[in-house]
């Protein structure tokens, strides 16, 4: 609730946007409650990284129980980009997996429907598919790539060719999440939605050149814009692009390229994932940083919550 953690859907904000009331203990030990409104404290609490205090209670907006109709398909990057703008407006959730160096993407689309429950048999089959293909087989491929990184391109194309297509329907909290047992390092950036096509074309051209040995797919999602002072989507509908490297493989050169490239697209990194943020860059990316820091000093005058890491990011 304090980091801008998000899902996918251009009409949907982050989890932080669901909060209507915060209860927190500030740096003086005082318990405070604040109801969301059109005020600076609300925009500071929206994504606070724990710097205003310890959240002990939140009130969130909810909606009645619903189901999701989920469809997974294989498509080409070229066609996916051609229909992307229309696709994200026509479907509640759209999520891409781009396979490095391949012309193939997996597209997951989900839309809300009236509550429908999956049968136990259907759940068991789906769980088995995920365990065998998306976790078991991918773990074996990842271990091969760690042993011999030059296999990464071939493994990426193999994974793309074996995308699991199909559809299913069930209660939203059973359909939306996916188990992930293959461990990885990750960096994720929010960029203006209008920059997504150009960014993906540059990413694809780089992978086609064979510079990096990466087999882990990139995850692409969208969210609505938010007003929070430290929200990565502040002021604009955004596309999120998440980059992964299998745990144990060398990620530094790859992530260094990512951090450099994303500056071109004014990318704001996810606060909770690997990044190269500096105080100077934070001040460039977030126009209301001074407002946030003024509120922070009011609620934490003795810097109780300003850790060594956060001090590097928020002190020029």
Image: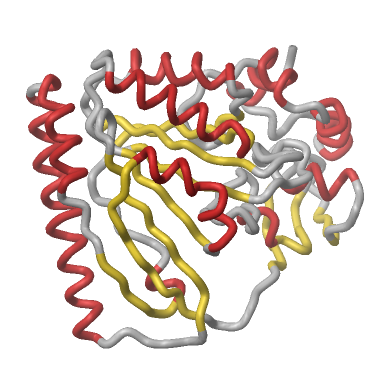
Give the tally of numbered discs: 0
- The residue depicted at 75 percent of the width and 54 percent of the height is 24
17 horizontally vs 67: left or right? right
- The residue depicted at 50 percent of the width and 47 percent of the height is 84
* Percent of width and height locating residue 294: 88, 30
* Percent of width and height locating residue 121: 19, 84
98 horizontally vs 65: left or right? left
Residue 275 visible in rendering: yes
* Percent of width and height locating residue 260: 50, 14
- Against 57, is 244 above or below? above
187 horizontally vs 205: left or right? right
- Against 249, is 27 above or below? below
- Against 33, is 200 above or below? above
Question: Camera-side residue: 307 or 88?
Answer: 88
Residue 301 visible in rendering: no
* Percent of width and height locating residue 60: 69, 67
User: In the picture, which quadrant includes the C terminus?
Assistant: top right
- The residue depicted at 40 percent of the width and 20 percent of the height is 255
| Location of residue 132 (image quadrant) | bottom left
| Location of residue 267 (image quadrant) | top right
- Against 316, is 293 above or below? below
| Residue furthest to the right | 39
- The residue depicted at 21 percent of the width and 27 percent of the height is 248
Question: Camera-side residue: 85 or 247?
Answer: 85
| Location of residue 63 (image quadrant) | bottom right
Question: Camera-side residue: 114 or 252?
Answer: 114
202 horizontally vs 207: left or right? right
């Amino acid at each position: 609730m304090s980091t801008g953690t998000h899902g996918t859907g251009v009409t949907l904000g982050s989890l932080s946007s669901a909060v209507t009331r915060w209860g927190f203990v500030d740096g003086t030990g005082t318990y405070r409650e604040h109801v969301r409104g059109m005020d600076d404290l609300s925009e500071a609490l929206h994504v606070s990284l724990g710097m205003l205090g310890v959240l002990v209670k939140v009130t969130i907006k909810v909606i009645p129980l619903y189901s999701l109709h989920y469809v997974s398909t294989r498509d080409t990057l070229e066609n996916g980009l051609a229909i992307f703008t229309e696709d994200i407006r026509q479907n509640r959730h759209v999520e891409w997996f781009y396979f490095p160096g391949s012309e193939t993407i997996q597209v997951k689309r989900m839309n809300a429907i009236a509550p429908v429950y999956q049968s136990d048999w259907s759940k068991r089959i789906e769980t088995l598919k995920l365990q065998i293909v998306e976790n078991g087989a991918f773990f074996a491929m990842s271990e091969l790539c760690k042993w011999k990184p030059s296999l990464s391109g071939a493994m990426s194309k193999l994974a793309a060719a074996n995308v699991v297509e199909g559809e299913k329907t069930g209660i939203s909290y059973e359909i939306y999440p996916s188990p992930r047992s293959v461990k990885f390092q990750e960096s994720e950036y929010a960029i203006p939605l209008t920059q997504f096509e150009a960014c993906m074309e540059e990413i694809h051209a780089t992978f086609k050149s064979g510079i990096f040995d990466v087999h882990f797919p990139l995850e692409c999602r969208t969210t609505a814009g938010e007003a929070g002072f430290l929200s990565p989507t502040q002021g604009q509908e955004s596309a999120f692009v998440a980059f992964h490297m299998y745990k144990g493989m060398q990620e530094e050169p790859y992530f260094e390229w990512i951090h450099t490239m994303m500056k071109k697209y004014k990318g704001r990194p996810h606060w909770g994932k690997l990044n190269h943020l500096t105080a100077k860059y934070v001040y460039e990316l977030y126009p209301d940083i001074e407002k946030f820091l003024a509120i922070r000093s009011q609620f934490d005058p003795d810097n109780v919550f300003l850790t060594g890491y956060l001090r590097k990011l928020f002190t020029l």
